[in-house]
Amino acid sequence: MRFAKKVILITGGARGIGRKTAEMFLEEGANVIICDRDLPTELDQVIKMNRDSVKFFNVDVTNTEQVNGMVQQAVDTYGRIDVLINNAGITSDGFLTKMNDNDWEKVIAVNLTGVFKCTKAVVPQMMAQGSGVILNASSVVGLYGNIGQTNYAATKAGVIGLTKSWAKEFGPKGIRVNAVAPGFIETNMTSKVPEKILNLMKEKTPLKKLGKPEDIASAYLFLASDEANYINGSILSVDGGLVV
Ligand code: NDP
């Protein structure tokens, strides 16, 4: 029960990595606030079973008013926010010559501006507490680029830049900021990737398999825990050795 009485806010927590992360924090005693664009039935059941310790907000991270309203309600309810996980993310892949302005803008809006908006909303509370942890979803693609992912790679590299900036800016206030750079993980997001490419990625990965949501969730739990209390400004690759 490493997170008993801790308050965790996770964006994009209805599916995939975010959902698994929310469940693992719950198992360790946390109060979990999940935000997402809709509430899938299976998550609704988890929420009903843990009524006192989970709150769901139908919030789009690109909407400043919704984000600020959610953070205010969370603070009114729990009096604090210990961990923010900026996990919500989307792709809209294509070769640059075929990528239109909308593909570019919507990915920037969620993956980069959404991280800015949620962090800006939460940081004043963490500063008042004198403590907090912010964890951002980057990607191996943000470190090394990828064909057909100009927009996505730009956001995930951008997340690394803001993680390092915030580590410097908020460290003196007792707030640690780190990012996780997952490799290819089995979720809805990668189900859109052609099987041929996924098999190629498996082959290129020294561990010869794709990752699972719990592999990334475990990294978030570690980085949020006191065991990581001297880790600040780091980008933790969790990719089976894909990009060593
Ligand atoms: P999923 O698509 O499975 O889940 C992402 C969740 O975020 C969905 O529930 C999605 O809702 C939600 N979301 C999207 N846009 C918004 C928004 N504007 N506001 C609130 N919620 C939103 O993705 P993963 O679990 O695979 O990915 C989670 C994070 O990890 C992302 O940031 C991704 O870029 C990153 N990542 C994933 C990798 C992978 O291989 N899976 C590899 C590297 C990084 P909806 O379904 O409605 O879109």
Image: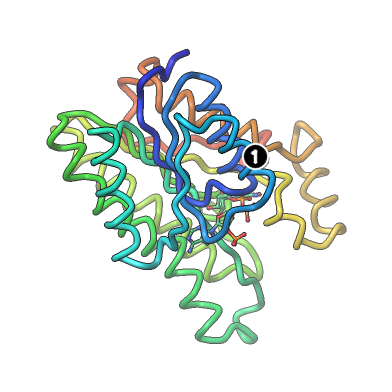
At 20% from the left and 34% from the top, the residue drawn is: 171
Residue shown at 26% from the left, 46% from the top: 122
Q: Which percent across, then down, holds residue 70?
A: 33, 52
> In front: 31, or 98?
31
Expressed as whole percent of the image width and height from the top left, the position of residue 151 reads 52, 70
SS for dot 1: helix
32, above or below 183, in the image:
above
Residue 30: which quarter of the image?
Answer: top left
Q: Which of 222 and 16 is in front in this view?
A: 16
Q: Position of 232 compared to 188: left or right?
A: left
Quarter placement of the C terminus: top right
- Would you say 76 lies left or right of 45 here? left
Ligand 1 quadrant assignment? bottom right
In the image, what residue occupies the spot 36% across and 64% down?
A: 113
Disc tally is 1
Mark 1 crowdedness (10 Å alpha carbons): few <14, some 14-19, many ≥20:
few
Amino acid type at mark 1: Gln
Q: Does the residue labelled 1 lie within 8 Å of ligand 1?
A: no
- Residue under label 1, please give it: 45
Q: Which of 62 and 200 is in front in this view?
A: 62
- Please provide percent x and percent y for residue 220: 49, 32
113 to 19, vertically: above or below: below
Query: Is residue 110 depicted above or below 99 in this figure?
Result: above
- In terms of depth relative to the viewer, which is nearer, 65 or 148? 65
Place of residue 221 in the rendered image (x, y in percent of width and height, measured from the top left): 48, 26
State left or right for residue 177 relative to residue 89.
left
Left or right, 134 with reference to 44: left
